[in-house]
Amino acid sequence: MTIFNNKIETERESFRTSYQSKKPFKYLIIDDVFKDKIAHKIHDEYPKVDVEWDGTTYLEQQKKFEKIAFKKNSFIQSIFDELNSEAFLGWLNYITDMEEPLIADPELEGGGLHQSINGAFLNVHVDFNFHPKTRLHRRLNVLIYMNIDWKDEYEGHLELWEIDGGNKNLLEKISPKFNRLVLFETNEISFHGHPKPLKIPADVSRKSLATYYYTKMRPASETADEHNTIYINTEGAKGSIRRFTSGLKALLERIKK
């Protein structure tokens, strides 16, 4: 795993302990996950938003762009190849103590490069639970942030939530700082998102790499009927208004097509 900081291996026992200790769902935060030169090269080669990015507005998100196709043998493609490699899958299996081998998704369904601009938000949600093509069970998310000198006033923190009926508890608010990895299991209670709209200058964007991992089966206690992404409002009246205006914008976009 040549792109990663050596501590991925030297500190893996403490990473495993930290991940396993989290409740009600497991997660882990690692800073400086890539070697410094690699991280800065990713940042410097991060593509600007253009027509090749998918920036479709939806009811629960807007001003978020995704890109999953890259030139063969390009530097960015090589990073995703490493994130989907057998070596990294083995490391993830060790950290998470998954009951069966994790399977990568080379097509990066829902993942790839993400980039959000001023005003962007993504409401709190749990992810789709089956891959739409392979029908594998979605089990794990890896997000790696590429934002140099990110300021708290920019918002855009990843929020992890415990939601049980009408009870909502913010577990952790994670700044999307440069070269920070967030790993968390995906199940029916792993609520997450960045629901507060970005407040950033025009020359700044919120950048992240996203890879998702799957298994052939999953424990019966975690199995649910197939569903798409399930959203929940954690922002009260402001969230409801934001959701309405985003839905209207999405409708207008589709009418124009």
Image (cartoon, rainbow, N blue to C red):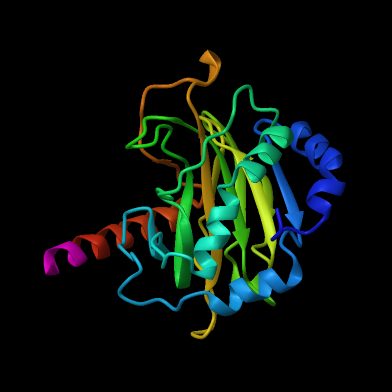
Residue 55 location (% of width, % of height): 34, 66
Residue ranking furthest to the front = 73
Q: Is residue 253 magenta?
A: yes
The residue lying at 33 percent from left, 64 percent from top is: 54
The residue lying at 78 percent from left, 59 percent from top is: 5
Residue ranking furthest to the top = 220
Question: What secondary structure is the magenta-colored segment mainly?
Answer: helix
Q: Is residue 116 visible?
A: yes
Q: Is 238 in front, or is 228?
A: 228
Residue 158 location (% of width, % of height): 60, 55
What's the magenta region?
252-257
Q: Is residue 109 above or below residue 115?
A: above
Quarter of the image with the C terminus is bottom left
The residue lying at 57 percent from left, 33 percent from top is: 102
Q: Is residue 110 magenta?
A: no
Q: Is 58 in front, or is 74?
A: 74
The residue lying at 40 percent from left, 49 percent from top is: 107
Q: Is 188 in front, or is 240?
A: 188
In the figure, is residue 3 to the left or right of 132?
right
Q: Is residue 150 visible?
A: no
Asked which quadrant contains residue 89, the reply is top right
Q: Is residue 163 above or below residue 155?
A: above
Residue 21 location (% of width, % of height): 78, 32
